[in-house]
Amino acid sequence: MSDFSDRVMNLASEGAYQMMARAQALEATGKEIIHLEIGQPDFPTYKNIAEAGMGAIEEGYTRYTPSAGIPALRKAIAEDAGNRRGINFDAAQVVVGPGAKTALFFPTLALVRPGDEVIYPDPGFPTYRAMIEVAGGVPVPVALREEQDFSFDLDAFDRLLSPKTRLIVLNTPSNPTGGVMPLAALEHIAEAARERDIWVLSDEIYARLVYDAPVPSIAALPGMLERTIICDGFSKTYAMTGWRLGYGIMPAALAGRVELLLNHSVGCTASFTQIAGLEAIQGPQDQVDVVVAEFNRRRLALVAALNELPGVHCRMPQGTFYVFPNVTALGKSSDWLADYILNEAGVALLPGTAFGENGEGYLRLCFANSLENLQIAVERIGRALARL
């Protein structure tokens, strides 16, 4: 039988997982692949965090917890996130979940009604469109323009606003572009949200992976705290992708609704994972600084190397561990190039179209890999492109 509901008929797998599976299939045949497709740190979870998690299991932290998270972790998140953004948060505004995607999906389910319009970035994280459609909303993509450092095209944003706009999704720093939205753009969006009574979901999962200056949060702007959901988590900052630990910060009334969605879906987040998260926040932060410095070293080297390739132009990302080079001069589609580079160069990367229609003409490479491997990857790509 294939009589599925409309809410799942348009769902598709994230391109990164599809590319990883294809790359692993090639590896199974003996082909050597350099993986630049999956967005996760290549460092192990920091030792103090791993030890806290393992110690928690030994101490019996293996049972159910409150659906919104253990009180100590919610309080620690509120204090840490507030200090970093210059905002006073209360623990009642924090909802912990198994991964940051719960802080994307569940607030959207709680707020968006059938027919409501949701503005989101394109190119952008594929889950944005998926969660909008599952909620019964109407996806309204707004282009991120390279000439504007991949911030919102504000003229297009203004044209897309309508009486049906219920929610605006932001992601800064951005996956896949590495762009950071300047304060002026956030102020422009905030003004529209206040005037039209629109919610904002700000995905700030990469907020600590920045290289030039701290990233402003729209939640800190006047009148925005009561209408903003912050999505964040531990995966990128603390190399905890497999631990599945994320959180949302939102008005307390909405947090109560999201807690109920967690209660009736996943129940709760693993208690030992939450203890590890508590150590991540309250423990030393020097390892984060070391890793960001290493990512910065790779960022500079990779962008310089890519810009040496004929037909390739790569802007310097301001945050994340992704580069998003422009390859339109090569005269091939992004999908074709990603396939060609995988098969001919043995380098797994993603086409920009894995992140939306406006990603055409671009490729995404994750530089969470060794500098040596990045250099070899660019050399291989260069040789493959020379054969076009």
Image (cartoon, grey):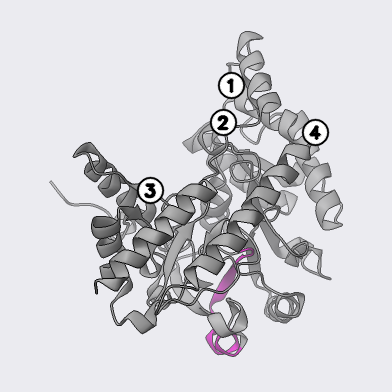
Question: Judging from the image, what secondary structure is the residue with disc 4 in?
Answer: loop
The crowd level at tag 4 (other Cα within 10 Å; few <14, some 14-19, many 20+) is: few
Where does label 3 land, which residue? Answer: 34
Q: Are marks 2 and 3 in contact (CB under 8 Å)?
A: no
Q: Name the residue beneath numbered marker 1.
A: 64
Disc 3 to disc 1: CB gap under 8 Å: no
Q: Which residue is mark 2?
A: 268
| Secondary structure type for disc 3 | strand
Nearer to us of marks 4 and 1 is: 4
Task: Give the mark nearer the N terminus: 2 vs 3.
Answer: 3
Real-space CA distance between mark 2 and mark 3, rounded to the nearest whole angstrom: 36 Å
* Residue 377 position by quadrant: bottom left
Q: Residues within 10 Å of mark 2 (few under 14, many from 20)?
A: many
Distance (Cα) linking label 4 and label 1: 28 Å
Task: Give the mark toward the camera: 2 or 4.
Answer: 4
Quadrant of the rendered image containing residue 190? bottom right
Left or right: 26 with respect to 185?
left
Magenta region includes residue 333: no
Which amino acid is tagged 4? Pro
The part of the chain drawn in magenta is 155-173
